[in-house]
């Protein structure tokens, strides 16, 4: 729980620093914002090992096809990457570009999710009486 306070503190400090620096050097403010975001990401990387261990346990218990989980993790990763990059674009004043990134990402996520949807429909069809 202590980590959340550190994340919030770094986020607020980064936000204040960019607000102070932006009127003087807007290019440097962008770099400070990106650096703050990368510091926060570096802080949470260690938590991914615990998440992956738990998910491996779930995969072993359920016995479902591991490709479903692989696609699911790719979708989650794409979502996080999109949010981060769209946030950077918004900070630089390119909200139109941020919207295009999010739209493109949503389409990619939809295409990536099609095998999962197909698999679920196949399972449902097997359960229905013929």
Image (cartoon, helix red, strand yellow):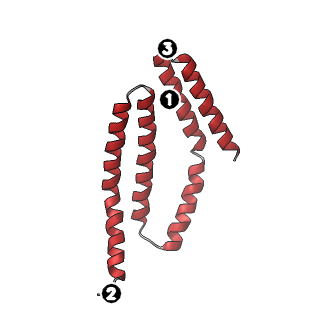
N-terminal of the two: label 3 or label 1? 3
Left or right, 33 with reference to 111: right
N-terminal of the two: label 2 or label 3? 3
Q: Give how far across and how far down residue 19 sits, in percent.
A: 55, 21
Left or right, 118 with reference to 56: left
Whole-number angstrom distance, CA of label 3 to CA of label 1: 15 Å
Residue underneath mark 1 = 34
Please, what secondary structure does the residue beneath circle 2 have?
Answer: loop
Whole-number angstrom distance, CA of label 2 to CA of label 3: 68 Å
Q: Give how far across and how far down residue 127 sits, in percent.
A: 37, 82
For label 2, the crowd category at 10 Å Cα-Cα, with few meaning under 14, some 14 to 19 and many 20 or more, is few
Q: Residue 129 carries which label?
A: 2
Q: Residue at x 33, y 54 (%)?
A: 110
Q: Camera-side residue: 19 or 46? A: 19
* Quarter of the figure with the C terminus: bottom left
For label 1, the crowd category at 10 Å Cα-Cα, with few meaning under 14, some 14 to 19 and many 20 or more, is some
N-terminal of the two: label 2 or label 1? 1
Q: Residue at x 35, y 58 (%)?
A: 113
Of circles 3 and 1, the one toward us is 3
Name the residue at the bottom extreme.
130
Q: Which mark is residue 25?
A: 3
Q: Residue at x 40, y 64 (%)?
A: 68
For label 3, the crowd category at 10 Å Cα-Cα, with few meaning under 14, some 14 to 19 and many 20 or more, is few
């Amino acid at each position: 729980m202590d980590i959340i306070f550190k994340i919030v503190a770094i986020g607020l400090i980064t936000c204040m620093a960019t607000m102070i620096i932006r009127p003087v050097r807007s290019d440097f403010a962008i770099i400070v914002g990106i650096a703050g975001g990368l510091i926060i990401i570096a802080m949470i990387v260690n938590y991914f090992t615990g998440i992956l261990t738990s998910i491996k346990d779930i995969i072993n218990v359920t016995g479902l096809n591991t490709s479903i989980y692989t696609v699911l993790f790719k979708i989650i990763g794409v979502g996080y990457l999109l949010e981060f990059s769209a946030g950077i674009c918004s900070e630089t004043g390119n909200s139109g570009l941020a919207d295009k990134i999010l739209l493109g990402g949503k389409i990619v996520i939809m295409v990536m999710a099609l095998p999962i949807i197909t698999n679920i429909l196949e399972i449902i069809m097997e359960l229905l009486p013929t």
